[in-house]
Image (cartoon, coloured by chain):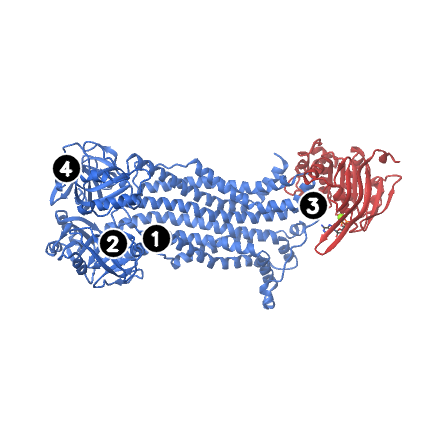
């Protein structure tokens, strides 16, 4: 047992499947996924396009609900949780980083972070969160005045400011070039190491997987393979 | 301030020009509501307290003469509370400094105490002293108009003798809140003097001792005026009763009441139009914002904001716009209400008319403004609630379009690509496009409704003064006189032409229906007072039978060929059956006409005459006036020029204000719709237009796509506005179809042009504003931002 596993599972996923109905057609995005995600772990989800990565992440983040199967967050059952309960779950426990940043364009960097600190229970200061991602000098800038990488770092600051137990990132570097991508990944890794936050990152980039404790590969809605890295590479050592 | 609140204000700031346009429409509706209903409340409260405090009567009756003991019989009629008898006589007045003779109405008041009913509000001076035969209290407006004050003297021709009357007080009466002579629409302040005189003095002068010729009643609560009137009419029948009328048909009260009704009616209908249009616009804007902010909404939800929390955010946005509009509307409405009440003090004579803004009206105004805003947010709320938070991860799918119907008819080949885009855009939101057209059309329609009455009154005045009444003055005799006596008048200096007429008070009865009117007997052909129908054609009276105005015929439910019973209320009071031989469309009053000869036969009388129409040589006017003032037979002189001047003065005064207010309101609503339609179009198509620019379309071609849609909407809206406006105007004409007057439905080409002009001007301004934004459109930025 690894140290991470010893700390116990944050998420316990059993027989999870998700079917989308599009008129006549049924699309099975997930077909029976069993997975435990452990406390403080850095997990990378790999898989080609359409394999169900986002669907899985959305369900464990309480954004979506499964068709069958169960998801438990610690001792909360997410499978049958009400909409209000899921909202509270997201509000207090989960930090999200989206592929397209999804900042509120009418709010400054600081205000975008405050959006979350104002409703969270034990948040850090919004400015501190921005400092953590290296944006202390950009706090008064609007999203439109920042580069993609900076916007994504604001999104990470926004996600970690509430001190979430889990940080879920869907292709956080998908829209970024290599250097900015590694800055962003560095920020995520730091959160994992310094705040002991459980992190799940979806990526297409197998190189990034070297940063992880564990790599899970999805294929056609199922877990195709899973392996644990003996050594976690730091961002600087990753060859893209 | 919370970050989400800050977002609210930034969003609002971002749509500020659209929000402003919508707030203006809401403001216009709310202002209209506050204006009309606060003025209504002020007028209504004043009316009620005035009527109460001064005991305005419930039933009014005139008669020839009855002994005082009859008053006790009247008091015994079930339902009657108080009976007050009076002597009322019309005389000619000679007012110092006024050359023309003035109509005076002398009304008796008790010397020892205040009248039981229809008491006077004494403004200055004192009450009549018992025993003083020459003292009068004068109507304040009349005195002011003629620069008369307490202590001044005016002369009255009483029973052939000039008598000097000394003004000891100035007063107002609830009977004359709107002081207008029967058959006229506008009061003549200087030419119609109401004077109150001691009962003994007046009875003395007119041989009315021990009797009365006018009676007013107040009723017990719950008593039926109709029943009391029926019994009263029977009781007064032997004494020359002219038919009693309820308060509702008392002339002053009728005008006041119809003004109140129209304030209340307009105040409850017109704001609905504005608020419905505003709600529609706000709905479009909010829905658009929600679709632009689709991913922001999803992100907020993903970050842990609750469904209703996010939805409420958008409700707040609409409520802010609603609140801004409503508050501005309340302020503007109160301001205009104050002005309008000021204008009313010139029309209506109240002891004190103060503007007040009841808290209830303000609360209601804010509530309806808020309700319109809240209603408009419903769709946005629904969409926010339905949006799954997982959406935050995905970009919006492209909008769905179809090949338009128009193109499928085979026109496709003839349409350029930009034209196809224009048509498909309109068709993409057919409901929205239609509502935009209707909303825009209401701008022009409101203009038509607001302005058509100006033309209608113009036509009425023209018919009245230039086509029908060709005389300069109308004189009425105290009593019907013989033809030879009438000729005396006609030989007075300055009379160029004269035409006698007979006027007989009657009660026309047909089945259950009856009305008290006067039958006017005219010579054939009558040259100075002609009967004119709606087509402005001269109607020649048939040798036999009655000609009734349409309104009278419809009140009596008769048509040509039917018989009516004529109860004559004068002389021997014969009862006759007469055939209705024709109808004539008239605007003022309810009239009945016969050839003079036929009327004489009906009355079994010789050449008895009630008055004459005169054509006067303007150069000898003063001499004629002097002689008329001294002629005992003459009870009243009506000068057409003065009457006409009054009409014009009164109308012109209100026309200017009406025109301005209407045009402003119409522009607000038209502009609100067009501008928002244009901005939404720009917002929805910024990417598309940017792309077209990138691939080489010119600025003009790109503008065409956006403005083409506006143009099409405008082209439909213009005729639609004429239709809706005409329909609304017809509704107004219907509402004003009263027994006292009616207005013709006249929508002139000019009004139509103004309505179309409003819509087009609104489009041009909006087009220009949007065009400017389009030129500033940053191609790169547009292509970079994701929606
Ligand atoms: N809302 C939806 N409606 C219908 N089908 C959906 C929906 N969301 C996802 N799918 C389908 O479910 C399957 C899995 O989608 P998912 O987004 O989880 O894939 P993914 O692994 O994240 O792919 P990518 O790497 O391209 O983001 C795909 O076939 C997709 O078309
Ligand atoms: Mg995905």
Q: Nearer the viewer, residue B464 or B681?
A: B464
Q: Which residue is mark 3?
A: B392
- Chain where mark 1 sits: B
The answer for how far apart the CA atoms under marks 3 and 2 are is 80 Å
The answer for how far apart the CA atoms under marks 4 and 1 are is 42 Å
Q: Which residue is mark 2?
A: B508
Q: Position of residue B401 (x, y in %)?
A: 63, 58
**Chain B on-screen colour:** blue
Compared across the picture, whether B360 is left or right of B239 comes to right
Q: Which residue is mark 4?
A: B201
Q: Position of residue B180 (x, y in %)?
A: 26, 46
Kindly tell me whether residue B99 is visible in this rendering.
no
The answer for how far apart the CA atoms under marks 4 and 2 are is 36 Å
Q: Is residue B211 above or below residue B183?
A: above
- Label 3 Cα crowd, 10 Å radius (few <14 / some 14-19 / many 20+): many
Q: Position of residue B280 (x, y in %)?
A: 53, 49
Q: Is mark 4 within 8 Å of ligand 1?
A: no
- Label 4 Cα crowd, 10 Å radius (few <14 / some 14-19 / many 20+): many
The answer for how far apart the CA atoms under marks 1 and 2 are is 20 Å
Element on which disc 1 rests: loop
């Amino acid at each position: 047992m690894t140290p991470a596993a010893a700390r116990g599972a944050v998420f316990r996923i059993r027989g999870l499947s998700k079917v989308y109905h599009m008129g006549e057609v049924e699309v099975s995005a997930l077909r029976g996924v069993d997975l435990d995600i452990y406390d403080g772990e850095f997990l990378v989800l790999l898989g080609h396009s359409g394999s169900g990565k986002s669907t899985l992440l959305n369900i464990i983040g309480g954004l979506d609900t499964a068709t069958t199967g169960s998801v438990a967050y610690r001792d909360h059952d997410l499978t049958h949780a009400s909409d209000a309960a899921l909202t509270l779950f997201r509000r207090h426990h989960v930090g999200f980083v989206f592929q397209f940043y999804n900042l509120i364009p009418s709010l400054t960097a600081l205000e975008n972070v405050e959006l979350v600190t104002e409703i969270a229970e034990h948040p850090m200061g919004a400015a501190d969160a921005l400092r953590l991602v290296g944006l202390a000098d950009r706090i008064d800038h609007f999203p439109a005045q920042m580069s993609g990488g900076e916007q994504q770092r604001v999104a990470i600051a926004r996600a970690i400011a509430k001190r979430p137990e889990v940080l879920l990132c869907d292709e956080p570097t998908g829209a970024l070039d290599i250097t900015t991508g590694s800055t962003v990944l560095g920020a995520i890794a730091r959160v994992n190491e310094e705040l002991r936050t459980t992190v799940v990152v979806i990526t297409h980039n197998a190189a990034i997987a070297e940063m992880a404790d564990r790599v899970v590969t999805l294929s056609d809605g199922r877990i195709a393979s899973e392996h644990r890295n003996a050594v976690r590479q730091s961002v600087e050592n990753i060859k893209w | 301030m919370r970050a989400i609140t800050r977002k609210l204000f930034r969003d609002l700031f971002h749509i500020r020009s659209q929000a402003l346009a919508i707030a203006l429409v809401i403001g216009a509706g709310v202002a209209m509501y506050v204006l009309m209903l606060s003025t209504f409340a002020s007028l209504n409260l004043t009316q009620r307290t005035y009527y109460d405090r001064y005991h305005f009567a419930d039933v009014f009756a005139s008669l020839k003469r009855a002994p005082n003991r009859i008053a006790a019989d009247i008091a015994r009629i079930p339902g009657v509370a108080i009976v007050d008898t009076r002597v009322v006589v019309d005389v000619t007045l000679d007012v110092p400094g006024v050359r023309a003779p003035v109509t005076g109405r002398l009304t008796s008041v008790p010397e020892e105490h205040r009248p039981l009913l229809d008491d006077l509000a004494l403004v200055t001076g004192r009450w009549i002293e018992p025993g003083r035969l020459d003292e009068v209290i004068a109507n304040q407006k009349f005195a002011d108009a003629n620069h008369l004050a307490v202590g001044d003297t005016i002369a009255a021709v009483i029973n052939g003798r000039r008598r000097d009357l000394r003004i000891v007080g100035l007063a107002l009466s609830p009977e004359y809140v709107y002081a207008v002579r029967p058959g006229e629409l506008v009061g003549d302040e200087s030419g119609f003097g109401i004077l109150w005189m001691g009962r003994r003095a007046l009875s003395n002068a007119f041989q009315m001792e021990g009797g009365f010729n006018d009676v007013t009643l107040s009723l017990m609560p719950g008593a039926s005026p109709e029943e009391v009137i029926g019994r009263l009419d029977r009781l007064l029948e032997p004494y020359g009763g002219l038919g009693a009328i309820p308060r509702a048909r008392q002339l002053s009260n009728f005008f006041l009441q119809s003004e109140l009704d129209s304030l209340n009616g307009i105040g409850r209908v017109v704001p609905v139009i504005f608020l419905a249009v505003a709600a529609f616009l706000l709905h479009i804007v909010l829905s658009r914002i929600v679709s632009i902010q689709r991913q922001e909404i999803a992100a907020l939800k993903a970050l842990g904001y609750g469904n209703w929390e996010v939805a409420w955010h958008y409700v707040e946005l609409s409520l802010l716009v609603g609140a801004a509009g409503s508050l501005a509307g309340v302020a503007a409405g109160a301001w205009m209400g104050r002005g309008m009440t000021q204008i009313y003090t010139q029309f209506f004579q109240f002891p004190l008319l103060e503007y007040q803004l009841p808290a209830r009206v303000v609360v209601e105004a804010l509530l309806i403004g808020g309700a319109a805003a809240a209603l408009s947010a419903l769709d946005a709320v629904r969409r926010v609630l339905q949006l799954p938070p997982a959406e935050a991860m995905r970009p919006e799918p492209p909008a769905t379009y179809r090949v338009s119907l128009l193109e499928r008819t085979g026109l496709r080949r003839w349409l350029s690509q930009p034209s196809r885009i224009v048509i498909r855009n309109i068709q993409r939101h057919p409901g929205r496009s239609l509502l935009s057209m209707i909303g825009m059309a209401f701008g022009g329609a409101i203009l038509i409704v607001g302005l058509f009455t100006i033309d209608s009154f113009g036509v009425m005045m023209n018919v009245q003064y230039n086509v029908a009444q060709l005389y300069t003055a109308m004189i009425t005799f105290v009593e019907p006189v013989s033809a030879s006596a009438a000729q005396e008048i006609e030989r007075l200096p300055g009379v160029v032409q004269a035409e006698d007429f007979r006027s007989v008070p009657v009660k026309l009865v047909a089945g259950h229906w009856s009305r008290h009117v006067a039958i006017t007997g005219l010579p054939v052909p009558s040259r100075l007072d002609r009967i004119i129908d709606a087509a402005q054609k001269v109607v020649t009276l048939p040798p036999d039978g009655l000609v009734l105005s349409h309104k009278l015929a419809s009140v009596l439910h008769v048509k040509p060929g039917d018989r009516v019973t004529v109860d004559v209320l004068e002389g021997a009071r014969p009862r006759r059956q007469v055939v209705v031989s024709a109808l004539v469309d008239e605007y003022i009053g309810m009239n009945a006409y016969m050839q003079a000869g036929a009327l004489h036969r009906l009355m079994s009388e010789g050449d008895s005459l009630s008055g004459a129409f005169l054509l006067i040589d303007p150069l000898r006017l003063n001499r004629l006036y002097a002689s008329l003032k001294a002629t005992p037979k003459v009870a009243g002189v009506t000068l057409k020029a003065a009457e006409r001047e009054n009409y014009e003065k009164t109308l012109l005064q209100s026309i200017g204000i009406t025109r301005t207010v209407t045009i402003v309101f119409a522009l607000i609503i038209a502009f609100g719709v067009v501008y928002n339609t244009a901005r939404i179009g720009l917002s929805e198509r910024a990417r598309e237009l940017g792309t077209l620019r990138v691939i080489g379309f010119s600025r003009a071609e790109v503008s065409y796509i956006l403005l083409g849609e506006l143009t099409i909407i405008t082209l439909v809206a213009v005729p639609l506005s004429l239709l809706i406006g005409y329909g609304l105007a017809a509704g107004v004409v219907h509402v004003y179809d009263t027994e006292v007057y009616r207005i013709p439905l006249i929508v002139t080409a000019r009004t139509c042009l103004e309505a179309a002009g409003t819509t087009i001007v609104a489009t041009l301004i909006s087009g220009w504003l949007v065009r400017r934004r389009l030129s500033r459109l940053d191609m790169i930025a547009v292509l970079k931002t994701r929606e």
